[in-house]
Amino acid sequence: MRIRHKRFAVAAAGVAFLASVAAAQPAAAATSSEAAFYTGANLTGTKTGVDVGAVGQCRNLARSAKSAVNIEAVDIAVYFNADCRVGAPGQGGDLYYVVGSLHTANFPYGAVSYRVRPMGG
């Protein structure tokens, strides 16, 4: 019973931390969602909001992104090639990244496109 309480406390603390990180970031672009890409690592640089209503549609980013935050009830598939093509930049392969709900991420390469999908989908 005690372990369950600790897990809940850790999960609640994680959600509170992510919410405070998102709230502390300067708003460089107006967005109606709590999901965004940033041009710098660790949620720094220019912010670009994610269109969470465009489930299943591929979106190309105007600027390459090095990090992201997702405090929405969706997953965000992130691609390092335009038009949601998998692989390392300029290469084929199966590489892509998923930023799950209530997560932040730093990417190994600049992200250039994304697709919003239902959680776990």
Image (spheres, rainbow, N blue to C red):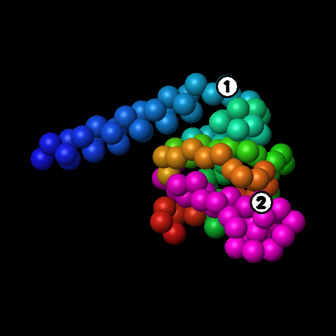
Q: Tell me where residue 21 appears, x and y as whole percent.
A: 54, 30
Q: Tell me where residue 39 appears, x and y as whole percent.
A: 77, 40
Residue at the far bottom: name it.
93
- Residue shown at the point (70%, 38%) measured from the top left: 41
Q: Nearer the viewer, mark 2 or mark 1?
A: 2
**Residue 77 magenta:** yes
The first of marks 2 and 1 along the sequence is 1
Q: Tell me where residue 118 appears, x and y as whole percent.
A: 52, 63
Left/right of residue 16 with respect to residue 39 in the rendered view: left
| Crowding at mark 1 (Cα within 10 Å: few <14, some 14-19, many 20+) | few
- Considering depth in this image, is 70 or 90 the residue closer to the camera? 90
Q: Judge whether 34 appears above or below 79 on screen.
A: above
- Residue shown at the point (33%, 39%) measured from the top left: 10
Left/right of residue 83 with respect to residue 114 in the rendered view: right
Q: Give the extent of the magenta segment.
A: 72-100
Q: Tell me where residue 96 appears, x and y as whole percent.
A: 68, 64
- Considering depth in this image, is 44 or 83 the residue closer to the camera? 44
**Residue 30 magenta:** no
Q: Amino acid at mark 2?
A: Phe
Q: Amino acid at mark 1?
A: Pro
Q: Kindly identify which residue carries mark 1.
A: 26
Q: Kindly identify which residue carries mark 2.
A: 80
| Crowding at mark 2 (Cα within 10 Å: few <14, some 14-19, many 20+) | many
- Residue shown at the point (12%, 47%) measured from the top left: 1
Secondary structure category for the residue under label 2: loop
Q: Which of the 4 quarters of the picture holds residue 82? A: bottom right
Q: Judge whether 48 appears above or below 78 on screen.
A: above
Can residue 48 be spotted in the picture? no
Residue at the far left: name it.
1
Count of marks placed on residues: 2
